[in-house]
Image (spheres, grey):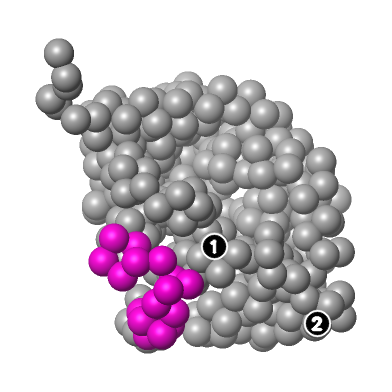
Amino acid sequence: MVVTILHIFHQTLPSPAVSALSLEMWWPFTGAFSVAVFFLVSGYSLSVGYLGHGRRDTLCRLVAGRYFRLIIPVFAACALMSLFMNAGLILPAEARPDFLSGVFTFEPTLAHLLRFALFDVLFAYDLTQTYAPPLWTISYEFFGTLLVAAALLALGPPAARLPVWTALVLVLVVFLPWYALFAVGVVAAGLGAGSTRRLPGMAGLALLAAGVGIAAMGEERLGLIVLSSVLFFAGAVTSPGAARFFSNRFSRWLGEISFPIYLLHIPVTFAAGLPIYVRDPDSTVTALAAGCVALAASIVAAVLFIPVNTLAMTVARRFGRAMTTPLARPA
């Protein structure tokens, strides 16, 4: 939701008043920080099941089904944007502000949709050919899954080999910092974060505050973003009060729509908000009105998209089980 608000009100439909606030420097509107937390939580959720029972087939099913888990929602979102473009709902480049003229200029053919949504989004991502700029993270999610599975199979549980996992995290921070966050998530799951490890309230809040402070000054420095997200995550899962706050009903609902709204908010903003915005882009009132329309439409679209997301999870699980079931069965 934070990424959605930043993209709509600051980057896609900005107004002079909002731009003057420099939202990208205010936590929690630092987009890189939000993405970092997203990757860290992914590493946690991808590994926590395996670490609970140690069955290797769990990791094999996860890897086997991961393509479908990601690509089915991605393809649906790209198909929606292709529909918008072919229906003339996306303003041509010459009718948009200059800072938005570099995207959605390709010919939205079926061949282009199939190539981008089924292959390029993971293996050859190109901003000029994308159906939604935030899709740059999808390849990290895919290869981050492979990293999590490979590291767990090669190194074993983090609780038993913490020095080795610490070394892996440090190496990744230096050479592949985004992927380091997946490894940190695995370590957190292995050490029982959020279940058996609790810190006194003030200690947990101090970690949260440290994460916030570092994020606010580290937008352009990826190493600081990694550090800030780790501290914030640690505070969120080890402080009882913070854990309750981030686990309430509203938070769980946000979690349910988080992936759908992440995929859809840029296509919806271009279709629903931009036509309002271009009427008077120098007007703060017009820009805010356009942003509010875009945000409301994005939330509605995300809710309607939940069945697609659920279908992707179901297909991924079934495909993973099918691919990892022993071929030879007893008579």
> In the displayed structure, would residue 256 be above or below residue 34?
above
Residues rendered magenta in the picture: 152-169
Q: Tell me if residue 159 is in the magenta stretch.
A: yes
Residue appearing at x 73%, y 43% in the figure:
252
Q: Is residue 78 magenta?
A: no
Earlier-in-chain disc, 2 versus 1: 1
Q: Amino acid at mark 2?
A: Ala
Residue at the location (67% across, 29% down)?
303
Q: Secondary structure at mark 1?
A: helix
In x, y percent, where is residue 315?
39, 26
Q: Is 55 rendered above or below residue 181? A: above
From the image, which quarter does the C terminus lie in? Answer: top left
Question: Could you tell me residue 42's position as x and y percent?
Answer: 50, 56
Camera sees residue 265: no
Q: CA distance from mark 2 to mark 1?
A: 20 Å
| 36 lies left or right of 200 | left
Q: Are marks 2 and 1 in contact (CB under 8 Å)?
A: no
Q: Position of residue 94 (x, y in %)?
A: 48, 46
Q: Is residue 158 visible?
A: yes
Q: Amino acid at mark 1?
A: Ala
Q: Quadrant of residue 65?
A: top left
Q: Quadrant of residue 204?
A: bottom right
Location of mark 2 (residue): 203
Q: Is residue 331 left or right of residue 51?
A: left
Q: Which residue is mark 1?
A: 189
Label the magenta part by its dominant secondary structure.
Answer: helix
Q: Residues within 10 Å of mark 2 (few under 14, many from 20)?
A: some
Q: Which mark is residue 168?
A: none
* Residue drawn at the location 68% of the way across and 64% of the way down: 196
Please give the name of the residue rendered at 56% of the width and 69% of the height, measured from the top-left corner: 191
Characterize the local packing of mark 1: few (<14), some (14-19) or many (20 or more) Cα atoms within 10 angstroms: many
